[in-house]
Amino acid sequence: MYGLGAAFLPSVSVGACIDLQKGANLLRYLQREQEFNPNVAFMTPVFCETLLKGRKSSRPYNFTVAAGDTMKEDTFIKYESQFGCLVRLYGSTEMGVMAAASPEAPLEVRIQKLGLPVSGVQMRVEQNQGEFTNENNEVGELWCQHEYGFEAYIDRDGKPIYENVDCNWFCTKDLGRISSDGYLEVLSRSDRSVNRDGLLVIFSDVEKAIQTIPGIEAVVVEAQGDSQRGKGLIAYCVLTKNSQLSEKEIRASCFQLLPKRAIPEHILLLPSLPLLSNGKVDRQTLIAIGNKTDFTNLVRR
Protein backbone atom coordinates (compact mmCIF):
# COMPACT_ATOMS: atom_id res chain seq x y z
CA MET A 1 0.00 0.00 0.00
CA TYR A 2 2.98 2.35 0.32
CA GLY A 3 2.92 3.48 -3.30
CA LEU A 4 -0.46 2.02 -4.29
CA GLY A 5 -2.75 3.68 -1.76
CA ALA A 6 -0.74 6.82 -1.12
CA ALA A 7 0.40 7.72 -4.63
CA PHE A 8 -0.82 5.57 -7.54
CA LEU A 9 -4.58 5.37 -6.86
CA PRO A 10 -4.96 9.06 -5.87
CA SER A 11 -2.99 10.07 -8.98
CA VAL A 12 -5.16 7.94 -11.26
CA SER A 13 -8.33 9.32 -9.70
CA VAL A 14 -7.40 12.88 -10.70
CA GLY A 15 -6.22 11.94 -14.19
CA ALA A 16 -2.48 12.39 -13.67
CA CYS A 17 0.13 10.87 -15.96
CA ILE A 18 2.30 8.47 -13.97
CA ASP A 19 5.78 7.07 -14.43
CA LEU A 20 6.41 3.97 -12.27
CA GLN A 21 10.05 3.05 -11.72
CA LYS A 22 10.90 -0.44 -10.55
CA GLY A 23 14.14 -0.72 -8.61
CA ALA A 24 15.06 2.86 -9.40
CA ASN A 25 18.60 4.00 -8.73
CA LEU A 26 19.91 7.52 -9.20
CA LEU A 27 21.00 7.05 -12.83
CA ARG A 28 17.73 5.41 -13.91
CA TYR A 29 15.71 8.04 -12.09
CA LEU A 30 17.52 10.94 -13.77
CA GLN A 31 17.19 9.33 -17.20
CA ARG A 32 13.44 8.78 -16.80
CA GLU A 33 12.99 12.24 -15.34
CA GLN A 34 14.52 13.81 -18.43
CA GLU A 35 12.20 11.84 -20.70
CA PHE A 36 9.02 12.08 -18.62
CA ASN A 37 9.52 15.58 -17.13
CA PRO A 38 7.37 15.15 -13.97
CA ASN A 39 6.15 18.13 -11.94
CA VAL A 40 5.39 16.08 -8.77
CA ALA A 41 7.56 13.36 -7.23
CA PHE A 42 6.71 10.69 -4.64
CA MET A 43 9.68 9.02 -2.94
CA THR A 44 11.19 7.76 0.30
CA PRO A 45 13.33 9.98 2.55
CA VAL A 46 16.28 7.70 1.72
CA PHE A 47 15.91 8.51 -1.99
CA CYS A 48 15.64 12.21 -1.13
CA GLU A 49 19.11 11.88 0.41
CA THR A 50 20.32 10.00 -2.68
CA LEU A 51 19.22 12.88 -4.91
CA LEU A 52 20.95 15.40 -2.69
CA LYS A 53 24.23 13.50 -2.79
CA GLY A 54 24.19 12.58 -6.46
CA ARG A 55 22.58 15.48 -8.27
CA LYS A 56 24.80 18.34 -9.39
CA SER A 57 22.17 20.99 -10.10
CA SER A 58 18.80 22.14 -8.79
CA ARG A 59 15.58 20.89 -10.38
CA PRO A 60 12.37 22.35 -8.89
CA TYR A 61 9.18 20.28 -8.72
CA ASN A 62 5.78 21.73 -7.92
CA PHE A 63 6.21 19.66 -4.77
CA THR A 64 7.65 16.35 -3.57
CA VAL A 65 5.85 13.91 -1.27
CA ALA A 66 8.08 11.87 1.04
CA ALA A 67 6.73 8.91 2.98
CA GLY A 68 7.86 5.64 4.50
CA ASP A 69 10.38 6.75 7.13
CA THR A 70 11.59 9.70 9.17
CA MET A 71 13.69 12.47 7.66
CA LYS A 72 16.54 14.44 9.17
CA GLU A 73 15.91 18.17 9.52
CA ASP A 74 18.99 19.19 7.53
CA THR A 75 18.01 16.80 4.72
CA PHE A 76 14.55 18.39 4.60
CA ILE A 77 15.96 21.93 4.40
CA LYS A 78 18.60 21.08 1.76
CA TYR A 79 16.11 19.17 -0.38
CA GLU A 80 13.59 21.99 -0.38
CA SER A 81 16.26 24.56 -1.28
CA GLN A 82 17.26 22.53 -4.37
CA PHE A 83 14.08 20.81 -5.50
CA GLY A 84 11.16 22.88 -4.24
CA CYS A 85 8.40 22.35 -1.71
CA LEU A 86 8.61 19.10 0.27
CA VAL A 87 5.70 17.61 2.19
CA ARG A 88 5.53 14.46 4.29
CA LEU A 89 2.80 11.87 4.40
CA TYR A 90 1.90 9.33 7.09
CA GLY A 91 0.20 6.04 6.34
CA SER A 92 0.30 2.28 6.68
CA THR A 93 -0.65 -0.86 4.79
CA GLU A 94 -3.67 -1.34 7.05
CA MET A 95 -4.99 2.21 7.13
CA GLY A 96 -3.75 3.76 3.92
CA VAL A 97 -3.05 7.50 4.19
CA MET A 98 -3.73 8.84 7.69
CA ALA A 99 -2.22 12.34 7.64
CA ALA A 100 -0.44 14.65 5.22
CA ALA A 101 1.11 18.10 5.27
CA SER A 102 -0.10 20.97 3.13
CA PRO A 103 2.34 22.57 0.65
CA GLU A 104 1.03 25.90 1.91
CA ALA A 105 2.12 25.24 5.51
CA PRO A 106 5.25 27.12 6.71
CA LEU A 107 8.58 25.32 6.38
CA GLU A 108 9.06 25.05 10.14
CA VAL A 109 5.69 23.29 10.46
CA ARG A 110 6.37 20.84 7.63
CA ILE A 111 9.77 19.94 9.09
CA GLN A 112 8.47 19.04 12.55
CA LYS A 113 4.96 17.76 11.85
CA LEU A 114 3.28 15.40 9.42
CA GLY A 115 0.20 17.55 8.99
CA LEU A 116 -3.46 17.08 9.80
CA PRO A 117 -5.43 13.82 9.61
CA VAL A 118 -7.06 13.44 6.20
CA SER A 119 -10.82 13.39 5.72
CA GLY A 120 -12.50 10.40 7.37
CA VAL A 121 -9.60 9.78 9.77
CA GLN A 122 -9.47 10.26 13.54
CA MET A 123 -6.27 9.96 15.56
CA ARG A 124 -5.75 9.57 19.29
CA VAL A 125 -2.78 9.16 21.64
CA GLU A 126 -2.87 6.38 24.20
CA GLN A 127 -0.34 6.01 26.99
CA ASN A 128 0.64 2.74 28.63
CA GLN A 129 1.86 3.87 32.00
CA GLY A 130 2.50 0.28 33.02
CA GLU A 131 5.53 0.11 30.74
CA PHE A 132 7.26 3.41 31.41
CA THR A 133 7.02 6.83 32.93
CA ASN A 134 6.91 9.54 30.32
CA GLU A 135 8.15 13.03 31.19
CA ASN A 136 6.13 14.46 28.31
CA ASN A 137 2.51 13.59 29.00
CA GLU A 138 1.57 14.40 25.39
CA VAL A 139 3.55 11.45 23.97
CA GLY A 140 2.05 8.00 23.57
CA GLU A 141 1.11 5.31 21.06
CA LEU A 142 -0.84 6.57 18.07
CA TRP A 143 -4.20 4.94 17.30
CA CYS A 144 -6.17 5.51 14.11
CA GLN A 145 -9.80 5.17 13.09
CA HIS A 146 -10.17 5.30 9.30
CA GLU A 147 -13.44 5.36 7.41
CA TYR A 148 -11.87 3.16 4.73
CA GLY A 149 -9.31 1.27 6.80
CA PHE A 150 -8.84 -2.47 6.86
CA GLU A 151 -11.23 -4.69 8.82
CA ALA A 152 -8.93 -7.46 10.03
CA TYR A 153 -5.93 -9.60 9.35
CA ILE A 154 -6.61 -13.10 8.06
CA ASP A 155 -4.63 -16.30 8.47
CA ARG A 156 -3.67 -18.78 5.76
CA ASP A 157 -7.06 -20.40 6.01
CA GLY A 158 -8.86 -17.11 5.43
CA LYS A 159 -10.04 -16.82 9.01
CA PRO A 160 -9.99 -13.29 10.47
CA ILE A 161 -7.46 -12.35 13.11
CA TYR A 162 -8.56 -9.18 14.91
CA GLU A 163 -5.12 -8.29 16.17
CA ASN A 164 -4.62 -4.63 17.20
CA VAL A 165 -8.22 -3.76 16.40
CA ASP A 166 -10.30 -2.25 19.21
CA CYS A 167 -13.73 -0.92 18.29
CA ASN A 168 -12.44 -0.07 14.79
CA TRP A 169 -9.39 1.70 16.23
CA PHE A 170 -6.03 0.48 14.94
CA CYS A 171 -2.78 0.69 16.92
CA THR A 172 -0.10 2.01 14.55
CA LYS A 173 2.71 0.97 16.94
CA ASP A 174 4.20 4.44 16.49
CA LEU A 175 4.98 6.89 19.27
CA GLY A 176 3.83 10.44 18.70
CA ARG A 177 1.85 13.42 19.83
CA ILE A 178 -1.03 15.55 18.56
CA SER A 179 -0.68 19.30 19.00
CA SER A 180 -3.44 21.54 20.29
CA ASP A 181 -4.21 22.60 16.71
CA GLY A 182 -4.52 18.97 15.57
CA TYR A 183 -1.18 18.48 13.83
CA LEU A 184 0.33 15.01 14.02
CA GLU A 185 3.95 14.41 14.97
CA VAL A 186 5.46 10.91 14.82
CA LEU A 187 8.56 10.44 16.97
CA SER A 188 9.47 6.79 16.63
CA ARG A 189 8.26 3.24 16.38
CA SER A 190 7.03 1.95 19.74
CA ASP A 191 9.61 -0.83 19.67
CA ARG A 192 12.34 1.78 19.18
CA SER A 193 12.12 3.05 22.71
CA VAL A 194 13.09 1.54 26.05
CA ASN A 195 12.69 2.05 29.79
CA ARG A 196 15.91 3.30 31.41
CA ASP A 197 16.03 4.56 34.97
CA GLY A 198 12.26 4.23 34.96
CA LEU A 199 11.83 6.76 32.15
CA LEU A 200 11.16 6.55 28.42
CA VAL A 201 14.15 6.85 26.08
CA ILE A 202 13.26 7.25 22.40
CA PHE A 203 16.01 6.13 20.05
CA SER A 204 15.32 8.89 17.52
CA ASP A 205 15.96 11.52 20.22
CA VAL A 206 19.36 9.96 20.94
CA GLU A 207 20.17 9.75 17.24
CA LYS A 208 19.25 13.39 16.63
CA ALA A 209 21.49 14.51 19.49
CA ILE A 210 24.51 12.49 18.33
CA GLN A 211 24.06 13.74 14.75
CA THR A 212 24.73 17.27 15.97
CA ILE A 213 28.31 16.30 16.83
CA PRO A 214 30.64 17.68 14.12
CA GLY A 215 32.10 14.82 12.12
CA ILE A 216 29.08 12.50 12.41
CA GLU A 217 27.34 11.70 9.13
CA ALA A 218 24.81 9.10 10.29
CA VAL A 219 23.84 7.25 13.45
CA VAL A 220 21.46 4.47 14.40
CA VAL A 221 20.75 3.44 17.99
CA GLU A 222 19.73 -0.08 19.00
CA ALA A 223 18.91 -1.72 22.34
CA GLN A 224 21.23 -4.64 23.04
CA GLY A 225 22.04 -6.42 26.28
CA ASP A 226 21.49 -4.98 29.73
CA SER A 227 22.98 -2.17 31.77
CA GLN A 228 22.63 -0.63 35.22
CA ARG A 229 19.98 1.69 33.80
CA GLY A 230 17.93 -1.06 32.14
CA LYS A 231 18.28 -2.12 28.51
CA GLY A 232 21.72 -1.42 27.05
CA LEU A 233 22.14 1.01 24.15
CA ILE A 234 24.62 0.90 21.27
CA ALA A 235 25.05 3.80 18.85
CA TYR A 236 26.30 2.77 15.39
CA CYS A 237 27.97 5.79 13.82
CA VAL A 238 29.29 6.68 10.37
CA LEU A 239 31.81 9.52 10.23
CA THR A 240 32.00 12.27 7.62
CA LYS A 241 34.90 12.25 5.20
CA ASN A 242 38.21 13.13 6.92
CA SER A 243 36.67 12.98 10.40
CA GLN A 244 39.03 11.52 13.01
CA LEU A 245 36.55 11.12 15.84
CA SER A 246 36.99 8.11 18.10
CA GLU A 247 34.32 6.10 19.91
CA LYS A 248 35.55 7.53 23.21
CA GLU A 249 35.28 11.13 21.98
CA ILE A 250 31.76 10.61 20.65
CA ARG A 251 30.55 9.11 23.93
CA ALA A 252 32.19 11.94 25.90
CA SER A 253 30.23 14.45 23.79
CA CYS A 254 27.01 12.60 24.63
CA PHE A 255 27.35 13.70 28.26
CA GLN A 256 26.92 17.31 27.10
CA LEU A 257 23.95 16.53 24.83
CA LEU A 258 21.82 13.91 26.56
CA PRO A 259 20.41 13.07 29.99
CA LYS A 260 22.39 10.27 31.65
CA ARG A 261 19.68 7.68 31.05
CA ALA A 262 19.90 8.27 27.28
CA ILE A 263 23.70 8.00 26.90
CA PRO A 264 24.63 4.81 25.00
CA GLU A 265 26.87 2.36 26.81
CA HIS A 266 28.79 1.76 23.60
CA ILE A 267 29.66 3.60 20.39
CA LEU A 268 30.61 1.57 17.33
CA LEU A 269 32.08 3.19 14.21
CA LEU A 270 31.17 1.70 10.82
CA PRO A 271 32.27 2.67 7.29
CA SER A 272 28.59 2.71 6.25
CA LEU A 273 25.19 1.57 7.49
CA PRO A 274 23.86 -1.71 6.08
CA LEU A 275 20.70 -1.17 4.02
CA LEU A 276 17.78 -3.33 2.95
CA SER A 277 16.63 -3.47 -0.67
CA ASN A 278 14.00 -0.77 0.09
CA GLY A 279 16.71 1.62 1.26
CA LYS A 280 15.93 1.37 4.97
CA VAL A 281 18.60 0.53 7.54
CA ASP A 282 19.12 -3.21 8.04
CA ARG A 283 18.79 -3.23 11.82
CA GLN A 284 19.18 -6.99 12.16
CA THR A 285 22.60 -6.80 10.53
CA LEU A 286 23.57 -3.98 12.89
CA ILE A 287 22.51 -6.04 15.88
CA ALA A 288 24.54 -8.99 14.58
CA ILE A 289 27.60 -6.74 14.23
CA GLY A 290 27.13 -5.50 17.79
CA ASN A 291 26.79 -9.02 19.14
CA LYS A 292 30.12 -9.98 17.57
CA THR A 293 32.00 -6.90 18.81
CA ASP A 294 34.36 -7.08 21.78
CA PHE A 295 33.59 -3.72 23.39
CA THR A 296 36.18 -4.29 26.15
CA ASN A 297 39.02 -4.17 23.62
CA LEU A 298 37.27 -1.37 21.72
CA VAL A 299 37.30 0.89 24.80
CA ARG A 300 40.96 0.12 25.44
CA ARG A 301 41.86 1.31 21.94
Image (spheres, rainbow, N blue to C red):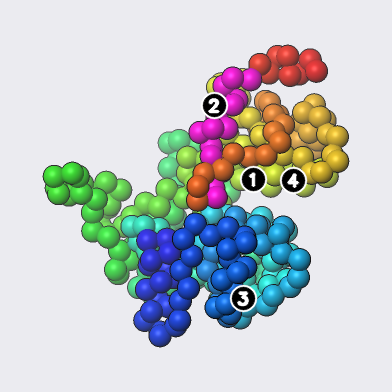
The image shows residue 230 at horizontal and vertical percentages of 56, 25
- Nearest the eye: 36 or 8: 36
Give the mark toward the camera: 1 or 2.
Answer: 2
Q: Is residue 266 visible?
A: yes
Measured Cα–Cα span from mark 2 to mark 3: 41 Å
What residue type is disc 1 on? Answer: Asp
Residue to which mark 4 is pinned: 217
What residue type is disc 2 on? Answer: Ala
Q: Secondary structure at mark 3?
A: helix
Looking at the image, residue 236 sits to the left or right of residue 144; the answer is right
Q: Is residue 196 above or below residue 63?
A: above
Q: Secondary structure at mark 2?
A: helix
Which mark, residue 288? 2
Sequence-first tag of 3 and 4: 3
Residue to which mark 3 is pinned: 34
Measured Cα–Cα span from mark 1 to mark 4: 16 Å
The image shows residue 96 at horizontal and vertical percentages of 37, 64
